[in-house]
Amino acid sequence: MKDQENAPDHRPDPGTGPGPVLDRSWPFTGRDGSLAELTSLLADPARAGVLITGPVGVGKTRLARELLARSAAGRALVVAATESTAELAFGAFAHLLPASLPATGGRPNLLRILADALLAEAGDDRTLFVDDAHLLDDGSAALLLHLAVRGGSRIVLTARSGAPVPDAVQALLRGDYATRVEVPALDQGDVVRLLERALAGQVETASAYRLWQVSGGNVLWLRQLVEAGLAAGTLAPVARVWRWRGPLGLPTELTDLVSHRMGRLGPDEQRAAELLAFGEPLGTAVLEHLTGPAVVDALDRHGLVLGEEDGRRTLLRLAHPLYGEVLRRGTPPHRRRRRCRELAAAAERTGLRRRGDIARVGAWRLAAGDNTDPRFLLAAAEHAVRTLDFALAARLAEAACAAGGGSPARRVLAAALGHTGDGVQAEEVHRGLPQTGTSEREQVRSVQLRAANMYLSLDRPTDALDLLRRAESTVRDPAARSELAGLQAVLQATQADWPACERDLARARPHASPGSATLVRTRYAECVAAFTHGRTGAALELAESALATLAAGDAEEDMPMLGVGLLSWLATAQAFAGRLDEAEATADAQYRVARESGWVGNQGAWQFFLGRIAARRGRLRSARRHMREAASTLREDTTWGQQALVFGELATIEALLGEVAEARTLLDRAHLARVESYRVLDVPAFQLARPWILVAQGRGHDAVRQALRTAADARDRRALLWEAELLHIPVRLGRSSTVARRLAELVAVCDAPHIAVYADHAAALAARDADALERACDAFEAGGLHLHAAEAAAQAARLWSGAGRTLAAQRAADRCHRLARRCEGVTTPAVLACRSPQLTDRERDVARLAAAGLSSRDVADRLGITVRTVDNHLYRVYRKTGVTSRADLREMLTPGESGESGESGESGDSMDSGATPDTGATVDTWTTGKPVKPVDTGKPGES
């Protein structure tokens, strides 16, 4: 069983307190495009002003104030219209107008008199800001029109979308005195950026998505949700990542705002809205059958429903997610049960033809208190398991058990509990299942589910394998025995016990017929073995074949982890087979599936794979972001069981970014989280980070020795893919002579394309062939390995410079800089050497450690030299580079370093990674250190 140390912890991180106290004004985010457009319009002398429109809370007033702060030379006159002032003539302008009108000889020109008074008040700037112009009385609106026609004034107005505005304001638009600009809701990426600026930290992708979805991108509603979450403690930092856990809290003010926006509903409309709140999306025919077409039309007129096409039918949803939240909270329990009962009955009348109908009806039955049909509840639970909604599956299966569902219901309950992180309770349910009186097929299914729970959730691989062996010895059906042997082969492959895996496969293969459960298991085990042995092409074919078999039938419907595991190996094989785009698409799609199903453990797992893929590309800060989210998520859900792998690979990323202390801490945490399962992943979890930590400490020679020792160990384990990764580390550090031959040998037995490039890279460096290094750079870049490509370019630049080929050296250095900018702050030795070729290796080590914030004493201790020697090196570094402080050193060594935000976790909707674009100018680091114009000389190497 796993340590108590790794048990879920729902408390906020120590020392974080209750959360930040949000300033009165949130950071201005996501409106740069609108602000630029408005600034341009307001500067146009042909127009008097702009009208900013949008729904309540979208940020119109804030945008207008930012516009005025940017555009107004002096102070602006501010007018705030309200429903109260709308009843009074010139009520909104009362504070700006004279207390009494001057005496006149005839009938006064009222608008001109009032305009003169306003302009006198405004002074030279003559800028007027009117908030909520749709609430202006007719006189105030006429005064605005008069000012615009008169000219010489700038007018900024805001108004609510859809609200009627006075005729004079319409005349401003008709006469082209003002231009209307609609402010949209914030998109998902903007919401992520706003949350992270407001909370001063990374926000979990799923939590940010949930807040974006519920708020609809409305800034006011988003802020109130966040403040309610902070107050209730449901929004809190976990392992350095802000996460929302538990139900959404709706403050009274927000509930009142939403209720006011929905308006007063009649009894029939209220019933229809409640049915939608508990059942959305609903087919139009279903809702019309329940309420009548006239009621549905009334909701549409109120703007409370939206329709979307789904094949041949139209689905209806409430027009805003918060409508549903408010309606559900405001519906008393007896009426909630009635509504769910009505929904279940209506859906059953349609025949439950659609894929998700049975699980939805099961959930409605539970909510209605109808737990009397164990067969239906069991069928709904099994469907929820297949769709990976294990929380719903557990509730349905528990109800089925209570209703007399027997062993089948208990087996599904055990499977669901194991996948929601409650492996101990799942084992108790498994142990209580009868061993006799059921069919042999049922016993085989139960044994496999129990073994999977032992392996995945309880970290008892030996017990899992013993259970499967005992079952295999007692089962009479040869096909069933082969199926059990196949699952043993899968577990032995993930344990990296290759002889045992081969023995199990030999027993399983005779009955691995097309479409069978045994075939899925054998190909799974063969996929793991092929990948680990460096045959990524074969691993891809095996994973795709097994997944196709699963998709064609329901042989594994009660063992979802086989499909999920195969998908993870597919993404991993894609990432190491030069198909990074496909790997990212796979991981992104599966993360979305996990998010929609609510399976938290799977969300953390796919964030890890997204991080691994980003690291493979060299996007280190994006990788760190994904990995931190994975660590935060898996801290509370141990289903995946691979926290050690997350910590180990995150340690490698931190070391590549030069964060030595953080990398060492993470590697220590990886060892503390070590489990008996998943031994096939020991190298990336515990070994790959060590050489890079030594590099970050300035101990390059020790790093090479460490990499070679670990590579030899990987070779003994037949982990050839990881051996190649370790052997390539000395090449990246400029020491290839000891590994070039072994890498060439690996090419002969591995089909992974990157291993062939590793071998070419090593051979080129050993031969001091700059042209060959540039070809290796080409191959790395084509495969998406930008950090590797940058290092090869840097090494080529150094060789060209040593040969006196200045122009070729400059071109290679320019390429290194361009590639390194994609890598978000990398500090590997080859790239640093390209940025500071005037420094010696020792000076560069001292400079990098000093730039990281270490004192001279700490640098001396790290490098094994005296403090005086450190200071002498620093003096020479400052003199050679022209910098004057350690902060300047950091800026010099990591130019173009991006911020922490990286990506949002969803590749399709990700935020910009912050990479600096190429500008056409380059830095001549090999000659003068000044910008030079790029020169295209044609053939690489031509000087």
Image (spheres, rainbow, N blue to C red):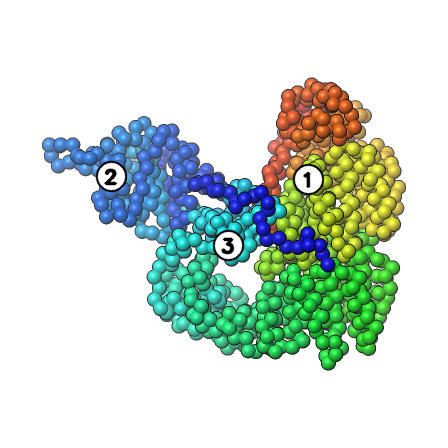
Q: Is residue 473 above or below residue 665?
A: below
Pointer 1 with pointer 3, Cβ within 8 A: no
Q: Residues within 10 Å of mark 3 (few under 14, many from 20)?
A: some
Q: Which residue is mark 3?
A: 213
Depth check, mark 2 against mark 1: the one in front is 1
For image coordinates 43% across by 59% down, the residue present is: 326
For image coordinates 55% across by 54% down, the residue present is: 245
In the picture, the disc for residue 662 is: 1
Q: Amino acid at mark 2?
A: Ala
Of labels 1 and 3, earlier in sequence is 3
Of labels 2 and 1, earlier in sequence is 2
Q: Amino acid at mark 1?
A: Glu
Q: Amino acid at mark 3?
A: Gln
For image coordinates 54% across by 44% down, the residue present is: 17
User: Residues under labels 1 and 3: Cα distance?
Assistant: 34 Å
Q: Which residue is mark 2?
A: 94
